Image: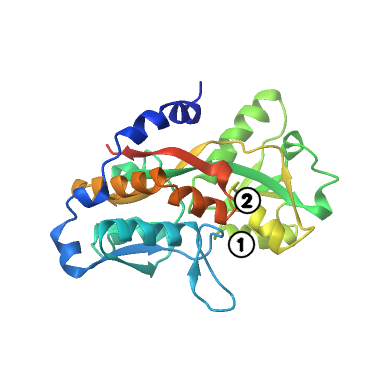
Amino acid sequence: MNRIALLAATAAVAALAVTSASAQTVPDRIKQAGKIIIGTNNNYPPIIFKDPATNELQGVDIDLGKAIAKQLGVEAEFQEIAFAQMLPSLQTGRIDMVMAGMSDTPARRETADFVDYMKSGAQFYTITALADQIKSTEDLCGKTVGASRSTNWPQQIGEWSDANCVAKGKPAITVVGTEGSADARTQLKTQRLQAAAQGNETLPYFQTLEPNTYVPIGAAFTESLVGIPVLKSEPQLRDAVKAAVEKLQADRTYDQILAKYGLQANKLPVALNRGM
């Protein structure tokens, strides 16, 4: 039984132990301000993006962030920050938590505790013009593949290459760290890259946005957890956020938010508290 399956098996038991977020004590500074400040970044649809018609923030993390704030009895204030500045902004107190589709990794847990609420996986893809040359993941060996350098995907591509190309006597993938996923898609369309990788929760959105452009290659080649980082010195806030997510899972608000964006397959059965 893998980790996600084990979580699913224990979800029913966990639901019985859900503590109402209202019973948690929100830190006084947040209670007095009447708001929780959430760092986000708008270039990761459908997790976070801007409506082109209204320029308003939308997405899973926006809807979920507002729902969490409501459970905590405060308003949600979103601040747009460069992804690389998310954790530093948390450390300096500019923001209270992050909701930006951030993967929960051991390195990041050295800085923050995470409340995990969704699962993800890195997905290889190419463009229609190259689909005849790259039909399977085996065809990636010897190719140039890019992914956002702000994520752990470049490292994971290299690890996949070592295990599936180099170890089998095939040429390694040339890994390129890009400025972001949008940059990776641009370089792919100009064929500076032959393939790219991004979260499997985002690729369907871009296939809808740009029909007949992107072609997935195989299944997701990693499994990861997406979480909400909270400052390690504020376990009180971390626990209140976790309780809020659990309440939203129990009353199915969480399910409704994921379904709104077509991400039912990325559901995490029960919120996890991951600290060091």
- Residue in the image at 48% along x and 54% along y: 150
Give how far across and how far down residue 93 sits, in percent.
23, 62
Colouring rule applied to residues: rainbow
* Residue 264 visible, this angle: yes
- Residue in the image at 45% along x and 64% along y: 41
Disc tally is: 2
Q: Quadrant of the C terminus?
A: top left
Q: Which residue is mark 1?
A: 183
Q: Which residue is mark 2?
A: 146
Give how far across and how far down residue 34 sits, in percent.
22, 68
Q: Would you identify the image quadrant in which residue 164 lies? A: top right
Amino acid, disc 1: Asp
* Residue 233 visible, this angle: no
> Dot 2: few (<14), some (14–19), or many (≥20) neighbours within 10 Å?
many
Q: Are marks 1 and 2 in contact (CB under 8 Å)?
A: yes
Looking at the image, which residue sits at the far top?
A: 1
- Residue in the image at 53% along x and 64% along y: 43
Give how far across and how far down residue 174 sits, in percent.
65, 44
Q: Nearer the viewer, residue 190 or 23?
A: 23
193 with respect to 244 (left or right): right
Looking at the image, which residue sits at the far bottom?
A: 54
Amino acid, disc 2: Gly
Helix, strand or loop at label 2? It is strand
Helix, strand or loop at label 1? It is helix
Q: Nearer the viewer, residue 262 or 105?
A: 262
Question: Mark 1 or mark 2: which comes first in sequence?
Answer: 2
Q: Nearer the viewer, residue 169 or 139?
A: 139
175 with respect to 238 (left or right): right
- Residue in the image at 27% along x and 59% along y: 96
What separation in Å lies between label 1 and label 2 (alpha carbons)? 9 Å
> Dot 1: few (<14), some (14–19), or many (≥20) neighbours within 10 Å?
some
Give how far across and how far down residue 78 sits, in percent.
37, 68
